[in-house]
Amino acid sequence: MSTVTDSSVFRDIFSSSASSVIWSDKTRTSYYLRFESALATAQARFGIIPRKSASAIAQKCDVDLIDMEELKKETRKIGYPVLPVVKQLVRLVNEVEPGLGEWAHWGATTQDVTDTATVLQLRDTCDLVAKSLENITCVLRKLARAHASTPMAARSNLQQAVPISFGFKLARLLATFERHETRLSEILPRLLVVEFGGAAGTLATISDTGVALQVQEELAKELGLNVPEIAWHTERDRITEVGSFFAMVTGTCAKFAFDVKLLMQTEVGEVFEPYYPHRGSSSTMPQKRNPISSVYITAMSSTVKQLSAALFDAMVEDHERSTGPWEIEWIVLPQICTMTHAILTHTQEILTGLEIHPEAMKKNLKKTQGAVTSEAVMMQLGKLIGRQVAHDLIYDLCRKAAQEDRPLVDLLSENELVLNSGVTRNELESWCDPANYMGLSKEMTIRVTNPDN
């Protein structure tokens, strides 16, 4: 095992089978060949290479025909995998008819092939991410609607703050994921572009044909990609942008997972990860039900963030073709992408089977003897005796309620200043009811979950 994403034990936790396939040697090599096939096809259409050669090249651009052991040895010797692939391809095509293979890789350079293959791998990864985001928002929308009026305590600095609804909490998460969906749609047109410029990006090798830019367009069309404004061999903003996006998405997942871990505490118990036998068990404490998926999410998210930062270093490339920063992408992108999809998968699984305990939320709202509604009382009393006066009074009464373990409403009912204000016991009980002080939790939740209504 070199990394947890390669481990036969941990692979399906810190990666996913779908994303692992995308970033495998076989898929990467198949995309090298797809580039070579598309290039030959495009060039043949414009008469740059013989159609017979293009047909033979396309026929032999089959990853199953590549000797992977030879590729491994040659890559170690040469330093890059593209030339060894091209050499095998040329040999395979020349076996069909001597000389046909010499037209392969015509006018291209190693980075053209590598960057385009990376873009295709990122496209596949983004497809997985888009589907995961769609599934997550779908589950969140249903949960938020169902709990639009379920009271719970908001937390500020890990202390109970004011009442909100659980649906409101989920709706905020939903809105964040929906913003990520928008971001992804904005990023893709910039990301999904072909790289074909030759040695320094000027297409000098085929510029004398008069159709070099048309070939570039045809190549992009063959691959289902867009045409860039200009070569981008050492302008790596596209790659850094999508890496940063993955860090943001996984950061959102980690924020949710962190909240789940806190809400699963024995003293809180308001939500739990999905249950199945022995999930989160301790080897020595039989009573334990530890958060598991949430732990993996937060750990991997932190790792994605650190790895994505390396992409900013990869942007600092020298001149028109760089002397090293480019290879940073080779190291970190597979891990960023496989972990991102794993994180989204864990997040979706938690949400789909999330155990929600409204009674625990209600019970916890009572723990402070009504102090959780102190702001509500202050705002109402403030209209009668002044906000600052009410603030200081409620502050003292909340401390007394905690010290004497008595309900705030009882202390309010006994207070001379409150009694002189003309407030009735019924009014005080209404002010001290958490369900009556959730603000616009329900309305805001509905606004997010039903944007057309």
Image: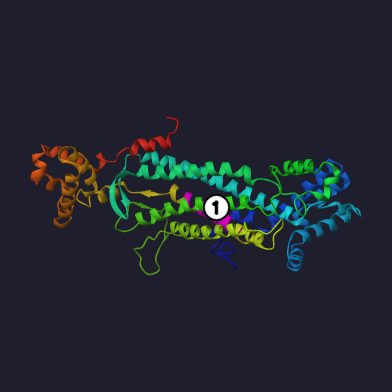
* Amino acid bearing label 1: Ser
Classify mark 1: helix, strand or loop: helix
Q: x%, y% of residue 156?
A: 32, 52
Magenta stretch: helix, strand or loop mostly = helix
The residue sitting at 44% across, 59% down in the picture is 295
- In the rendered image, the residue lying farthest to the top is 453
Tell me if residue 337 is in the magenta stretch: yes
Q: Is residue 274 above or below residue 423?
A: below
Q: Is residue 432 visible?
A: no
Q: To which residue does mark 1 refer?
A: 244
Write the start and end of the magenta stretch as one range. Answer: 334-348
Q: Position of residue 290 (x, y in %)?
A: 39, 61
Above/below status of 82 relative to 120: below
Q: Position of residue 337 (x, y in %)?
A: 58, 55
| Residue at the image position 69 percent from the left and 42 percent from the top | 226
Task: Find residue 374 and report its horizontal and vertical position in percent.
Answer: 22, 46
Left/right placement of residue 401 relative to residue 229 reads left
Identify the residue shown where x is 14% and y is 52%.
406
What crowding class fits label 1: few (fewer than 14 Cα within 10 Å), some (14-19), or many (20 or more)? some
156 or 281, nearer to the observer: 156
Tell which residue pokes out farthest to the front in this image.
319
Residue 3 seen from this side: yes
For residue 288, which quarter of the picture?
bottom left
The chosen color scheme is rainbow
